[in-house]
Amino acid sequence: MSGTRPLVYHWIAYYNDGTKLDQFNKDLSENGFSKIDNNKLNKIGLYPFSKKLAEGITRSNSSTVALSLGFLPVYELEIKDGERPIYYRDCFISQEQFHVCNSCKKEFNYDGYNNHIIKYKDDQLGIKYNEVVPICPNCGAHDYFTCKSCGKEFQSFNEALHGMCPDCGRSKGYLGQHNITSKQYSRERRWNYYYFGKQNTIKGTNIKFLMKISESGDCVVT
């Protein structure tokens, strides 16, 4: 998906006096993470948005989109004396290329090597050839050629003698290409990771615990 990624998590900081600080206030304005008072913080959590909160944030803020995904797990951390919370997001962007089969209308990736080989034989020379072309892995379709004069079909341009129909000759045996799988498309894909954890400095050494949380809720401790 292109464009700004929607938020799927929001944080809440809990204080030892029973109060708390939400990332989003009741009026849907947003608090910066630096606004958390670490001196009285005793717990912090990442929570999926409720439907009501996600819709309200999206309506009220043109630059922030929130998405409610009820299946996401909750992540909470106890913060002890001397510990400091960590939270930030990273957005990753990739450009990807793909093909669309005009026969079955499905997408597929083409690497130019494996499983994309047409085998054919030159009957006049008695030589077998292999040619690498985009072949749809779903239905097996690929580009093919037909003689514009007699309609004879060829699996590859090189299957015909010098790119000409051997039955019609060079005077009129020109080939026409049927573009089934050769057209390549590109798109931008974006996704967020949420980094959530805590750190402490003990005898001059920085001790850190950090979780890398995907938009689907999967977590890896880094």
Image (cartoon, grey):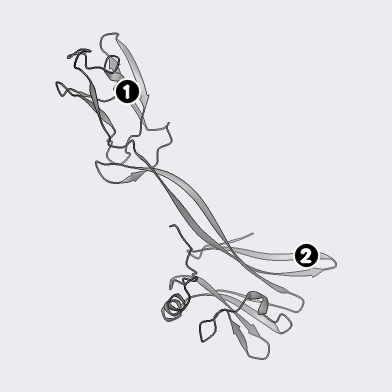
Alpha-carbon neighbours of circle 1 within 10 Å: few (<14), some, or many (≥20)? few
Image-based side of 172 in relation to 211, left or right: left
Displayed quadrant of residue 92 = bottom right
Q: Is residue 193 above or below residue 155?
A: below
How far from the left and from the top, in percent, is residue 6?
47, 67
Displayed quadrant of residue 207 = bottom right
The three-letter code of the residue at mark 2 reads Asn
Q: Of the residues under marks 2 and 1, which one precedes in the sequence?
A: 1
Instruction: Residue at 26%, 9% (x, y): give it.
Output: 124
Instruction: Residue at 66%, 86% (x, y): give it.
Output: 15
Among all residues in the image, which is located at the extreme left? 150
Viewer-proximal residue among 169 and 86 = 169
Viewer-proximal residue among 97 and 59 = 59
Question: What mark, if any, has residue 206 been given in the picture?
Answer: 2
Q: Is residue 54 above or below residue 155?
A: below
How far from the left and from the top, in percent, is residue 64?
49, 71
Question: What mark, if any, has residue 216 been given in the picture?
Answer: none
Alpha-carbon neighbours of circle 2 within 10 Å: few (<14), some, or many (≥20)? few
Question: What mark, if any, has residue 119 been given in the picture?
Answer: 1
Q: Quadrant of the N terminus?
A: bottom left
Mark 1 secondary-structure assignment:
strand
The three-letter code of the residue at mark 1 reads Lys
Q: Is residue 89 above or below residue 45?
A: above
Image-based side of 183 in relation to 19, left or right: left
